[in-house]
Amino acid sequence: MDPSRIEQLIRHGLPGAEVEVRGADGVHFEALVVSPDFAGKLPLARHRMVYATLGTLMGNEIHALSLRTVTPQEAGVGNGE
């Protein structure tokens, strides 16, 4: 699995999200996902939203995915910082 493909899938499932995925071995990945859709949601709910964009790839082609999920405000994006 290619990190850019994972980025595409997450962006498609969470329109407007900023996504950065890294992973050199093709099965273990780290992702930063910044989305306004995360506002008011606990971390577990945010992670579930991301996992839903990947469907059956999780646990199959994607063995492990470490997530950092934040809103634009939490990331300091778009607030003049």
Image (cartoon, rainbow, N blue to C red):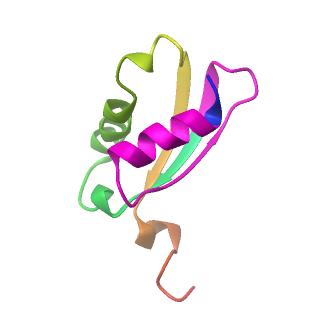
Going 52% across and 74% down the picture, which residue do you hit?
76
Query: Can you give x and y, in whole percent of width and height, for residue 33 in the image?
Result: 48, 51
- 80 relative to 19, above or below: below
Q: Quadrant of residue 16?
A: bottom left
Q: Is residue 75 left or right of residue 26?
A: left
Q: Looking at this view, name the residue that lies furthest to the left.
A: 40
Q: Residue at x 37, y 31 (%)?
A: 51
Residue numbers of the magenta segment: 4-30
Residue 36 lies, in percent from the top left, at 33, 64
Where in the figure is residue 55, as x and y percent of width and height? 35, 23
Q: Which residue occupies the extreme right position in the image?
A: 24
Compared with 63, 49 (above or below) is below
Q: With respect to residue 65, does 43 lie above or below?
A: below
Residue drawn 47% across and 84% down?
79
Q: Is residue 62 above or below residue 81?
A: above
Screen quadrant of the N terminus: top right
Q: Residue furthest top?
A: 60
Total labels drawn = 0
**Could you tell me which residue is drawn at 53 percent across and 89 percent down?**
80
Q: Position of residue 30 (x, y in %)?
A: 61, 36
- Residue 18 falls inside the magenta stretch: yes
The verdict on residue 21 being magenta is yes
User: Quadrant location of residue 17?
Assistant: bottom left
Report the quarter where the C terminus lies: bottom right
Q: Is residue 35 left or right of residue 3?
A: left
Foreground: 55 or 12? 12
Between 43 and 71, the one lying in front of the other is 71
Nearest to the observer: residue 46 or residue 2? 2
